[in-house]
Image (cartoon, rainbow, N blue to C red):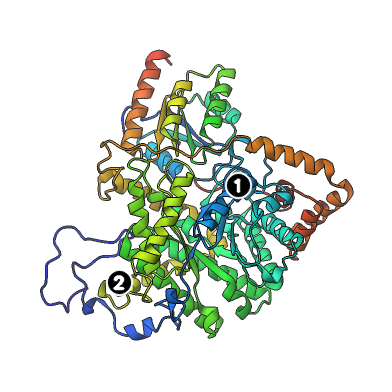
C-alpha cells in the first residue's frame, strides 16, 4: 500500500488498435498493489474513456500506447473530456513515446508521460504528486 | 546437484539461477551432465537434432538474413524491402499494420490512428501488387507476418492473387505466413477479437489449403517470440511454442493430412533474449523435444519431418530507450546466441526499437550487424560449437525437463485452445511479466538504461516518423475499389464466405473468391466476426 494512492480510483485503457498489453497490465497490477481501485477497460474509444471516468468519479485516467498512436488518441481523450466538462480529471500516458512527443503531450494538457523504461516507483511517486496537486486545485 | 564434485569454488550467498530460475553451478563439470549424452546429442542433421537440423549447418546454408519491415503505404514499404534486398538481406519479412492484422479496413472509424503503424497498411488486393512491385516472387522467399489468422487468410489470398497476376505459379512460391491463433487471442489485444476456437480453426484451414495447393509455403509460424515478449520466460516460451505446434499437428492429422506432408511445413519463430547460455540451451532443447514428440506420438521417423526449423528475432522487450545505442551491443549478443543455437533465419532489432519503428539508419545498422556475425566472427564455421560444454548440456537438459512439465500442465487442461479459453495463458504471461518488473524494482535484475547508469547523459536518437498521407491514401483507394467493383458478385461472395465460416468445411476457397470479387480485408474480417462472434480477453 502506498498511502497517497490508497483508495483512489483510476480508469485504465488502451486506445485504437494498439495490441501490446504487457505494460498496461503490469502497471495496473502495481497500482492495485499500491491500494488504488483500478477500472481496466481494455480497448476503449476516447469517448468511452471520458464517459467512464466521469461516471465513475475517477481520480485519474491512465492511457497506454505502444503503437505510435499516442498523439492522435491522447488529444482525442482530452477533447472528449473537455466536451463533458471533465478536464479536472488528470490524464497520464505510458508507452513507446519519443521525448519530443512527450513534450507535446504535456504541453497539450497531459499530467505525465511515462516512456519505455520508466520504473514502477517513478510512476507511483509521480501519480501521488499528480493526485495531490489535483486535490488542491479542485476540492472533491 | 554436485555431490560428485570434488570440493571446488564454493557456491556462496543466495542461489544463482538463470533468468527462468534454473540453478547455475559456479563451474559446471561432467557431474552436472546426466548419463547418455551421446544419445541426446546425435550428429548435426540427425535425430534428435540437438546439434542442428543440417549436417553441414551454415557451411552449406547460412542463416537467412530476414529483417522485418513495414510501415505506411505499400509503396513506402516496397522501397524499404528493396533497400534491404539490395544491401544484403536474403529474404523479405513483411509486417502489417494493426488494423489490417485484425481484419479491419483503414477507413474503419476506430482504425484511423493506427493506419500504417507497426506495419504496412493493406486493404485491397491492389495493395499487394504494389507491396511486391519489382520483387521476383519466384526467387525471393517472403515471410508474411500476418500474425492473426483473421488477417492472415485475406493477406495470403491477396498475395496469391498478386503472384497469379504475374504468372508465378503457386508451386513456385516460397515463404511463410505467421498465422497464429494465440496472437489473436492471448498475446496481442484488440477490439472484437475472434474466440480462440474460431481463430484456431481459421489457422488450420489456411494450413490445410496451403499444404494442398502451395507446397513450398509454411502456413504456420508458431510465434514463441511474441509469447516471450508478452511476458513468458524461456520455459513458458518453449512450452507454449511446442504445445501450439502439437495442437496444429494433431488437428491437421485429424483432418486426414499425412504427417509427412504437414510436418516439414510447420515452422517456428523464437526469441533470443539476454540470458546467453539459457537461450542457447532453449534452442537446442526445443529442437530435440520436437523431434522426440514427432517420433513418439506421431510415429514418424523420416528425418525431414522431425526437424524443428525456426526463425529468430532479438528481444525487442530488452531494448531500452535510454542509452539506445547500447541496444546494438545487446542485440549482437542475442543474435550471436541465436546463431550458436542453430537458427535458420535471423532478424536483429534496430537500436531504436524502444522509441519507434526503425529508421533507415537503425535498420541498416542491424542488417550490417548480421553481416559482421556471418563474415567476420567465424561462428558459422562449425555446427553446434557449444555442444559438449558441461554448462550448455546441463542447461539444455534442465530446459527440456522444465518445459516438458509445463506442456503436461497444458495437456491436462485439455490442450492449448482450452487453456487459452480458460484464461490460463493470459494469467501465466501476466504473472511472469509482473515478476520481471519486480526484479527490476528490487535490483535483482540490472539493466543499463533502466536501473543501471540510467541517470547518465545520453546521445539522443531521432525517432522514425511515419510518412504523412497513409490514411488518406488508403481511404482513397478503398473508395475507388468500392466504386469500381461489381456489387452483385461481391455481395454473393461475402454471403458465401459467411456461410462457409458457419459451416464445417474449409473457408479458404471462399476467401479467395471474395478477394477475386474485390472484397477488402475489413469486409472479410467482418464476415468472420458475424459468423463466430467475438470475446473479451481474460486479462483482468
Please say if A69 is above or below B126.
above
Residue B107 makes an appearance in the image:
no
How many other residues sit within 10 Å of disc 1, few (<14), some (14-19) or many (≥20)? many
Quarter of the image where the N terminus of chain B is located: bottom left
Please say if B17 is above or below B349.
below
Seen in the image, is B115 located left or right of residue B281? right
Q: Tell me the tag on residue B429.
A: none
Q: Chain of mark 1?
A: B
Q: Which residue in the rendered view is the most extreme toward the front? A: B86
Determine the residue positioned at 59% across, 45% down.
B98
Q: State the residue in front, B15 or B340.
A: B340
Residue B413: give x, y in percent of width and height: 51, 64
Mark 1 touches mark 2? (CB < 8 Å):
no
The verdict on a common chain for dots 1 and 2 is yes
Please say if B143 is above or below A104.
below
Residue B352 makes an appearance in the image:
yes
Sequence-wise first label, 1 or 2: 1
Residue B409: give x, y in percent of width and height: 45, 66
Q: State the residue in front, A28 or B302.
A: B302
Q: Nearer the viewer, mark 1 or mark 2?
A: 1
Q: Tell me the tag on residue B120.
A: 1
CA distance separating discs 1 and 2:
40 Å
Q: Mark 2 falls on what kind of element?
A: helix
Q: Mark 1 falls on what kind of element?
A: loop
Seen in the image, is A127 located left or right of residue B95? left
Determine the residue positioned at 32% across, 42% down.
B323
Residue B99: give x, y in percent of width and height: 62, 44
Amino acid at each position: 500500500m502506498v498511502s497517497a494512492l490508497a483508495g483512489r480510483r483510476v480508469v485504465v485503457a488502451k486506445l485504437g488498435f494498439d495490441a501490446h498489453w504487457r505494460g498496461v497490465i503490469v502497471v495496473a497490477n502495481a497500482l492495485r498493489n499500491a491500494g488504488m481501485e483500478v477500472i481496466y477497460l481494455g480497448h476503449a474509444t476516447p469517448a468511452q474513456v471520458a464517459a467512464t471516468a466521469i461516471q465513475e468519479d475517477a481520480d485519474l485516467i491512465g492511457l497506454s500506447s505502444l503503437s505510435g498512436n499516442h498523439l492522435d488518441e491522447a488529444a482525442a481523450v482530452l477533447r472528449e473530456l473537455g466536451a463533458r466538462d471533465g478536464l479536472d480529471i488528470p490524464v497520464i500516458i505510458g508507452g513507446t513515446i519519443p521525448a519530443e512527443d512527450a513534450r507535446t503531450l504535456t504541453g497539450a494538457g497531459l499530467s505525465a508521460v511515462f516512456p519505455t523504461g520508466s520504473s514502477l516507483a517513478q510512476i507511483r511517486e509521480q501519480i501521488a504528486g499528480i493526485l495531490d496537486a489535483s486535490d488542491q486545485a479542485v476540492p472533491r | 546437484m554436485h555431490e560428485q564434485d570434488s570440493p571446488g569454488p564454493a557456491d556462496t550467498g543466495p542461489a544463482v539461477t538463470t533468468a527462468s530460475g534454473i540453478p547455475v553451478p559456479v563451474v559446471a563439470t561432467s557431474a552436472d551432465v546426466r548419463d547418455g549424452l551421446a544419445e541426446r546429442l546425435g550428429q548435426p542433421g540427425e535425430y534428435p537434432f540437438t546439434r542442428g537440423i543440417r549436417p553441414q549447418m551454415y557451411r552449406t546454408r547460412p542463416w537467412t538474413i530476414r529483417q522485418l519491415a513495414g510501415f505506411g503505404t505499400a509503396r513506402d514499404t516496397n522501397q524499404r524491402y528493396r533497400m534491404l534486398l539490395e544491401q544484403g538481406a536474403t529474404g523479405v519479412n513483411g509486417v502489417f499494420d494493426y488494423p489490417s492484422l485484425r481484419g479491419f479496413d483503414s477507413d474503419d472509424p476506430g482504425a484511423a490512428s493506427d493506419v500504417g503503424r507497426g506495419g504496412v497498411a493493406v486493404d485491397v488486393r491492389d495493395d499487394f501488387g504494389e507491396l511486391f512491385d519489382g520483387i521476383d516472387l519466384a526467387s525471393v522467399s517472403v515471410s508474411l507476418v500476418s500474425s492473426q489468422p483473421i488477417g492472415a487468410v485475406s493477406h495470403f489470398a491477396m498475395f496469391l492473387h498478386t503472384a497469379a497476376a504475374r504468372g508465378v505459379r503457386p508451386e513456385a512460391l516460397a515463404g511463410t505466413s505467421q498465422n497464429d491463433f494465440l496472437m489473436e487471442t492471448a498475446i496481442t489485444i484488440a477490439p472484437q477479437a475472434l474466440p480462440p476456437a474460431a481463430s484456431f480453426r481459421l489457422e488450420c484451414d489456411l494450413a490445410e489449403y496451403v499444404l494442398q495447393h502451395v507446397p513450398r509455403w509454411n502456413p504456420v509460424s508458431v510465434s514463441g517470440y511474441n509469447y516471450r515478449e508478452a511476458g513468458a520466460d524461456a520455459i513458458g516460451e518453449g512450452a507454449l511454442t511446442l504445445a501450439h505446434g502439437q495442437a496444429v499437428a494433431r488437428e491437421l492429422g485429424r483432418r486426414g493430412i499425412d504427417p509427412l506432408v504437414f510436418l516439414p511445413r510447420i515452422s517456428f519463430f523464437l526469441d533470443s533474449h539476454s540470458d546467453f547460455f539459457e537461450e542457447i540451451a532453449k534452442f537446442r532443447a526445443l529442437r530435440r523435444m520436437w523431434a522426440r514428440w514427432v517420433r513418439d506420438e506421431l510415429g514418424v521417423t523420416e528425418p525431414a519431418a522431425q526437424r524443428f526449423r525456426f526463425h529468430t528475432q532479438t528481444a525487442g522487450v530488452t531494448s531500452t530507450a535510454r542509452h539506445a545505442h547500447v541496444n546494438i551491443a545487446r542485440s549482437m549478443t542475442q543474435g550471436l546466441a541465436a546463431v550458436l543455437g542453430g537458427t535458420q533465419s535471423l532478424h536483429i532489432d534496430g537500436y531504436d526499437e524502444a522509441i519507434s519503428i526503425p529508421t533507415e539508419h537503425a535498420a541498416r545498422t542491424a542488417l550490417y550487424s548480421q553481416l559482421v556475425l556471418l563474415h567476420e566472427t567465424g561462428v558459422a564455421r562449425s555446427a553446434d560449437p557449444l555442444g559438449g560444454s558441461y554448462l550448455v548440456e546441463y542447461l539444455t537438459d534442465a530446459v527440456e525437463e522444465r518445459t516438458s512439465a509445463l506442456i503436461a500442465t497444458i495437456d491436462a487442461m485439455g490442450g492449448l485452445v482450452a487453456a487459452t479459453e480458460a484464461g490460463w495463458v493470459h494469467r501465466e504471461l501476466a504473472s511472469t511479466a509482473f515478476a520481471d518488473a519486480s526484479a527490476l524494482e528490487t535490483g535483482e535484475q540490472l539493466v543499463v538504461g533502466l536501473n543501471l547508469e540510467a541517470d547518465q547523459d545520453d546521445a539522443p536518437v531521432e525517432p522514425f516518423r511515419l510518412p504523412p498521407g497513409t490514411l488518406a491514401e488508403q481511404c482513397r483507394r478503398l473508395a475507388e475499389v468500392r466504386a469500381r467493383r461489381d456489387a452483385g458478385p461481391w455481395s454473393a461472395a461475402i454471403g458465401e464466405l459467411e456461410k462457409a465460416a458457419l459451416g464445417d468445411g474449409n473457408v479458404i476457397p471462399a476467401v479467395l473468391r471474395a478477394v477475386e470479387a474485390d472484397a477488402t480485408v475489413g469486409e472479410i474480417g467482418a464476415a468472420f466476426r458475424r459468423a463466430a462472434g467475438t470475446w473479451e480477453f481474460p486479462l483482468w
